[in-house]
Image (cartoon, rainbow, N blue to C red):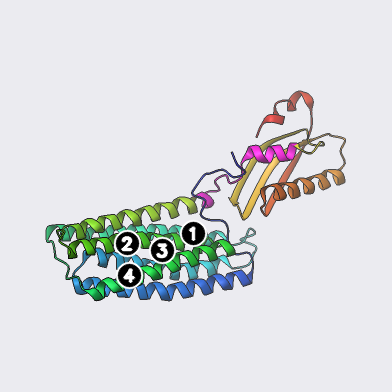
Amino acid sequence: MGPYRKVSQAYFIGGPVDKLSIQKVKGVLTLILIANLAVAAVKIIAGQLIQSASLTADGFHSLTDGISNVVGLIGIWFAAQPVDENHPYGHRKYEFLTGLFIGFMLLLIAGFVLYDASLKFIQPVVPEITFASLVALIATLGVNVFVCVYEYRQGTKLGSAILIADSLHTRSDVYVSISVLLTLLGIKYGLPPIIDPIASLVVVGFIIKAALQIIRSTSDVLVDAAVADSDTIRDITLGFPEVRGVHDIRSRGTERDLYIDMHVLLEPEMGIAASHDLCHAVEQKICQELKVRARVMIHIEPYKPMKSANLKLSV
């Protein structure tokens, strides 16, 4: 097993770490918001004009991208608030709460699209496919590809959970738009119109998949799921000759904002100053080995051979 437990899809790697990063995240979200609203408007208008259930559904799916950008801007504002008396660990989890909200919002949109597709099954409508509508769909597809790649790269670079969640949302848009494009081309060249609402069901599948990815990843952080592999932490700590045992190793947070606490057994004769220096050395070594910025809290216990014989191997 590697240094990190695979408790989730691990899309979220931490929140912005300074004011400059926060401003950059806001700038990216604002730019993507404008692009997403334009894409959604083109798809919905074109879908209504040609009476295409799948293209209209794709447009509403794209509209959720714009809504999630607005939610993201609100979430990043809360997450950027400084540490205060009531929030000694800061407000960073607001970013993950925002991601969780986006996930549930996607599930709601999936229900709306499913309802619209069911109406088209009852009363099928033949889309009036035009060259202009195909060009519009291809153009918006290109915009979505750019948005997805750009936003994911910026999210990784800035360590922003919101940008990464939003890029996954947009990635589902790319796959959906491809399926809609193929559907419209199929109808244009002779396939029955029933494939249009069927394609809407494919859209629903992608929306639900993206929603569950986001909900699972954000939930892992919010409920303090283990992040670092305890065996790796144990091996690093026992690499110090002064350490006689380690147990109760716990971790939470994200790979970019990691919290670790554990109990370490030392010889009773070891002084306070030496123990303090050792704890700092262990913390520094863990950060170096895992290549993370970790906060390590160590509870020191006196080593007693009879009681501690089994703790050296425990986590």
Q: Assess whether mark 4 and mark 3 are in contact (beta carbons under 8 angstroms).
A: no
Query: Position of 214 compared to 155: left or right?
Result: left
Can residue 160 be found in the magenta stretch? no
Identity of the residue drawn at 55% across and 48% down = 224
Residue, disc 1: 97
Viewer-nearest residue: 270 or 73: 73
Disc 2 and disc 1: Cα gap in Å? 31 Å
Q: Which residue range is magenta in the image?
A: 220-238
Residue 127 position in % (x across, y down): 17, 67
Q: Amino acid at mark 4?
A: Ile
Q: Nearer the viewer, mark 3 or mark 2?
A: 2
Q: Assess whether mark 1 and mark 2 are in contact (beta carbons under 8 angstroms).
A: no
Residue, disc 4: 138
Q: Residue placed farthest to the left in the image?
A: 123
Disc 1 and disc 3: Cα gap in Å? 19 Å
Identity of the residue drawn at 58% across and 70% down = 22
Q: Amino acid at mark 1?
A: Leu
Does 117 sit above or below residue 139? above
Disc 4 and disc 2: Cα gap in Å? 9 Å
Residue, disc 3: 170
**The quadrant where residue 54 appears:** bottom left
